[in-house]
Amino acid sequence: MQSTPYDVIIIGTGAGGGTLAHRLAPSGKRILLLERGDWLPRERANWDSAAVFLQGRYQARETWYDADGHPFHPGIHYWVGGNTKVYGAALFRLRPQDFREIRHYGGISPAWPITYDDLEPYYSQAEQLYQVRGRHGEDPTEGHWSQQYPHPPIRHEPRIQQLSDDLERLGLHPFHAPCGALLDQDDQGRATPFSRCIRCDRYDGFPCLVQGKSDAEIICVRPALTHPNVQLLTRTRATRLVTDGSGRTVTRVLAERDGQPEEYRADIVVVACGAINSAALLLRSASDQHPHGLANRSDVVGRYYMRHISSAVMALSIEPNPTQFQKTLALNDFYFRADDWDYPLGNIQMVGKSDGEMVKGEAPHWAGWAPEMAFEEIARHAVDFWLTTEDPPLAENRVTLDRDGALRLHLRDVNGEAHRRLTAKLQRIVSRAGMREHLLPRRLYLGKLMDIAATAHQAGTVRFGTDPRTSALDVFCKAHDLDNLYVVDGSFFPSIGAVNPALTIMANALRVGDHLLERLK
Ligand SMILES: Cc1cc2nc3c(=O)[nH]c(=O)nc-3n(C[C@H](O)[C@H](O)[C@H](O)COP(=O)(O)OP(=O)(O)OC[C@H]3O[C@@H](n4cnc5c(N)ncnc54)[C@H](O)[C@@H]3O)c2cc1C
């Protein structure tokens, strides 16, 4: 006799939840996906930079609070596919060293309970699944790989190829950035039906109108739903998890569907709401058996929040930069150290190309810089970079809930000096690579950068580990304190490295998926 209507409930359909659903779907197990968002509409505004960046059309209308109680609107997106609906699909692996302890200027990044070798097969599987384009072997800092990327890299357009040549001339090691794209040339160089998109500048931060982006909805959720054993409920927000009397088993998921209370039951419950919302859901699920929040005997739930110290900057090329798809180049020469510094600085990569509307939106922040150039003219010469420095995890950087349930995010950057040095390196590079030496901050990409509202790369709030006193999850991301509760999104990271996190979340979801398939046998 079946005791519950579902074998597995997955809460959240982003990089973690969507990928897990894809792995479990062929098993025939009864799977229910709960997603607070809806299907993202395909509409002209998908590619309208004013709608996307200035008006935040696809961002959630949420208000959270910082440690001092100041309200802010997080750069977060609630849709089927989660934040991957707007991500740039730069799908990097962590370096093998990122799985070990690393000493940063601002603190220590602890070792993971698994090694790069443990995750490597799943990195390969995730790269195949998400159709990543790139070339293993180009980046001298990358770890070993068991399968080449399924597709060759997206070719640099001429201005970026020139930049790549200039960087090599300076003794650096640029490489093709791995990118998840269902478009451009096929392996024989023929244009595919989506070829328009890859030439377009509406990728990074935008939903893809022609569905040419390898996001979790297109790659995982839709295919999973072709299996009759998989069901999705949209506009359904999980509000609380309830356990049995022993406190060891989650027996009910309480939710609101279009504002109406609902409840669902399954043998296994997977929380995949994104690092901040997963922590909040567990904290909201406090009970007599779990007075500090579900799965929180260690008191780490909500703590060790990480989000990268990142910034987007614009350099101005002396020659015009007519590039449309700009995210093809990356540089890890300063990932572990620099010639003049012994601590890690981070990763440099390209970001989506600025257009006149974006420049206009940024202009007030530049206070008099380059006023003589028209917005369109600035955009024509813009070369845009994304810099990422690791933020070592701190116990006091955390998600908490106020008495009224409001979400509070505590954040202090301790590694800013490393980021300043990375920016200085880039500044020196651009001045020697055919660009003006000034770097202009692009504050509108991902909300106000360096600001607490930049939550795009959130991770770490329900960390995994072998010791239940210092971690909330075991090595398979099952809560130490419960028998049937898993967390499979960016929450599990003990440290975040300095590359974009999504591929690691996807690879881990496949790894946990294999574990669950064994368990469900
Ligand atoms: C503009 C932008 C650009 C980015 N670019 C890149 C990039 O190029 N490369 C990269 O690696 N990463 C990038 N990222 C980050 C990447 O998108 C995230 O790291 C990744 O999506 C996180 O996966 P996740 O599963 O943890 O959470 P998400 O993908 O956010 O999924 C969480 C899901 O849970 C749902 N949810 C939340 N709470 C509840 C609830 N209570 N009940 C039900 N459902 C709930 C949400 O609606 C969402 O669908 C970018 C992010 C943004 C915003």
Image (cartoon, rainbow, N blue to C red):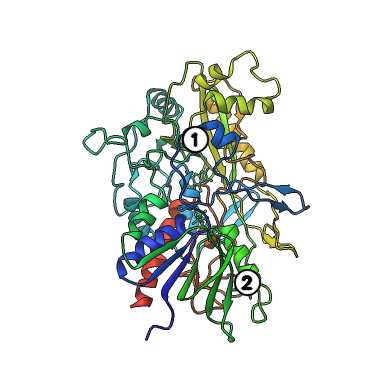
Residue at the far right in the pictured view: 68
Q: Residue 58 is drawn in which quadrant?
A: top right
Q: Identify the residue at image location x=63%, y=60%.
A: 304
Q: In the visual, does 6 lie left or right of 425?
A: left
Q: Is residue 345 in view?
A: no
The amino acid type, in three-letter code, at marker 1 is Ala
Which quadrant would the N terminus be assigned to in this image? bottom left
The amino acid type, in three-letter code, at marker 2 is Ser
Circle 1 residues within 10 Å: few <14, some 14–19, many ≥20: some
Q: Identify the residue at image location x=33%, y=47%.
A: 131
Viewer-nearest of labels 1 and 2?
Answer: 1
Q: Is residue 81 in view?
A: yes
* Secondary element type, mark 1: helix
Q: Residue 110 is drawn in which quadrant?
A: bottom right
Tag 1 residue: 45
Q: Position of residue 373 (x, y in %)?
A: 60, 14
Q: Identify the residue at image location x=34%, y=68%.
A: 229
Q: Nearest the camera: 1 or 497?
A: 1
Q: Position of residue 296 (x, y in %)?
A: 62, 73
Tag 2 residue: 285
Q: CA distance from mark 1 to mark 2?
A: 38 Å
Tell me if residue 381 comes above or below residue 259 in the rendering: above
Disc 2 beta carbon < 8 A from ligand 1?
A: no
Query: What count of labels does the image hold?
Result: 2
First in sequence, mark 1 or 2: give its number. Answer: 1
Q: In the visual, does 55 lie left or right of 231?
A: right
